[in-house]
Amino acid sequence: MKKGNSYKHEPAVAGSFYPGSGKELEESVRVLMEKAEASSALGVVSPHAGYMYSGPVAGALFARVIVPDICVVLAPKHTRMGSSQFAVWPDGQWLMPMGRVQVDEDFCGRLLRSCDLTGPDEDAHLEEHSAEVQIPFLQAVNPDVRIVPVIVSSGELKALQEFGRSLAGVIKKTEGEVLVVASSDMTHYEDQESASEIQAIQKMDW
């Protein structure tokens, strides 16, 4: 929703998918993030269910990742809101329980100009949980993180490849490190052992 000269995102699932109190959320994330040695990464895949379901997996992941100042969050669409295949929240702030998070307006602007499949489409984000649930973990690791939220509704391989190439081009021209967080349902029915046998990501298999 636009307030003044910029957009401000109100939490859609605070109090349901994760605690709505900043203090309670901070403690919850701290407990979920087990102590581990962190390292740099180009991209990670993180689950996006309620924290009571996927929190331990997300916590284990983000405890092991160095979160730079810019993070691109690619999240699938679960609602009928918005019209862009790749809906970018263009600027402003996300008003999260643990504090405000700044959107990287410069990066978003360059991404929007680089790919015709993108659009400045805040409607797609308003009731969507898949990007929002990642933010507290990013905040916990780097309180100064700036985000590039993108809701992905396209499942067409050519469109995904085109967007991916555009995103890569923007990242290459960005000073400093950029982390890409791919928000995923992971699986609703496989056990850990079966899910671990899926090798497509490790093989970079489109």
Image (tube, rainbow, N blue to C red):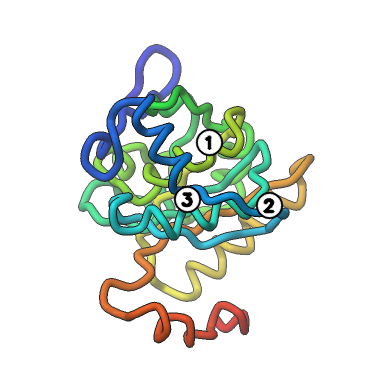
Q: Which residue is mark 2?
A: 38
Sequence-earlier tag: 1 or 3: 3
Mark 3 residue crowding within 10 angstroms, few (<14) / some (14–19) / many (20+)? many
Picture disc at residue 17: none
Q: What type is the residue that disc 1 sits on?
A: Ala
Q: Is 65 situated left or right of 97 in this image?
A: right
Q: Nearer the viewer, residue 27 or 185?
A: 27
- What residue sits right under mark 3 in the picture? 118
Pick whichever, 14 or 12, lies toward us. 14
Tell me the quarter of the image containing the C terminus.
bottom right
Pair 1/3: label in front = 1
Q: CA distance from mark 1 to mark 2?
A: 13 Å
Calculate the distance from the C-alpha at mark 1 to the C-alpha at mark 3.
29 Å
Q: Quadrant of residue 43?
A: bottom right
| Residue bearing the label numbered 1 | 140
Type of residue at label 2?
Answer: Ala
